[in-house]
Amino acid sequence: MNGLHLIADIYRCRPNAELLTRRAALENLCVSECRNAGLSPLGAYFYQFEDETGEPAGVTGTVVLAESHLAIHTWPETGDVTLDVYVCNFSRDNSDRARHVFQRVIDALAPEETVRHEVIRGRLPVEA
Amino acid sequence: MNGLHLIADIYRCRPNAELLTRRAALENLCVSECRNAGLSPLGAYFYQFEDETGEPAGVTGTVVLAESHLAIHTWPETGDVTLDVYVCNFSRDNSDRARHVFQRVIDALAPEETVRHEVIRGRLPVEA
């Protein structure tokens, strides 16, 4: 269960594609960037919010990975997004793969500001 | 997007039910405890790992909430689990609901040790 959990609060995004408001666009981005990074999506659930007139509003979703998960939530009213990528390093060190998908998704969102946290999950490796 | 993200690394669990190895048991626990806490599950994806003989091994899954998400991963080899509950406080303060479901799931896992982190997501409220 040792692993790396990358957390970002992402502000004032202005992506080219409709990533903040269209379920399919955001899901495709997240699943394909996980695959491109060498991670293994097992399944995904993304939900489309609608406003009171039935127009697409925010999107919320998760990609379940063999290596753990990605979670993303959008607030198009303000252009803000939260992103989590957590990978365990059970059979190999997936930290670089996690950093790759994390940065690729942030870049696609074209934010003005990103606040990042990192949490080391599980026990630290015992020094030899 | 302001909200509370609760993180736990949970060690040496010995639950009564087969929560570490059975997808349905773990999914039912997580979805029902979210509902009981007053949160709103929109969907869930849980995956059953199997060992080389086809017997149930670990489980990994996420519950997508109107208020954000719950994510859980089990390692039955060691009895360890990682748990995340993140709620945004967009339309109301969901922090107490998050703490409730977080503690209920941990209690059901009957661990010997739990290491917790809290991350405040988004901007802090501006003082009047």
Image: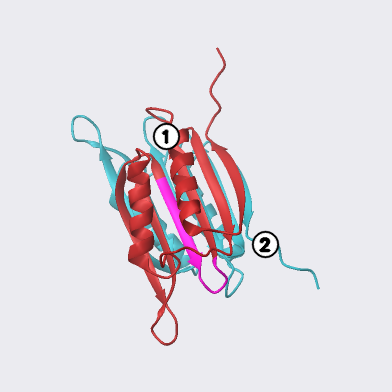
Chain colours: A cyan, B red
Residue B25 spot, x, y in % from top left: 35, 63
Question: Which span is picked out in magenta?
Answer: B69-79
In the structure shown, which secondary structural element does the residue marked by tag 2 occupy? loop
User: In this figure, which residue is indicated by the disc labeled 1?
Assistant: A79
Q: Quadrant of residue A64?
A: bottom left
Choose top left, top right, bottom left or bottom right for residue B92.
Answer: top left
On the rendered structure, is B88 left or right of B31? right
Residue B128 image label:
none
Identify residue for label 2.
Answer: A123
Q: Is B128 placed left or right of B49 in the picture?
A: right
Residues tagged by mark 2 and mark 1 found on one chain of the structure: yes
Q: Residue sitting at 58 percent across and 67 percent down? A: A94
Residue drawn at 52 percent across, 42 percent down: B5
**Up-down relation of residue B89 to residue A10 (above or below):** above
Q: Residues within 10 Å of mark 1 (few under 14, many from 20)?
A: some
Observer-nearest residue: A81 or B108? B108
Name the image quarter holding the C terminus of chain A. bottom right
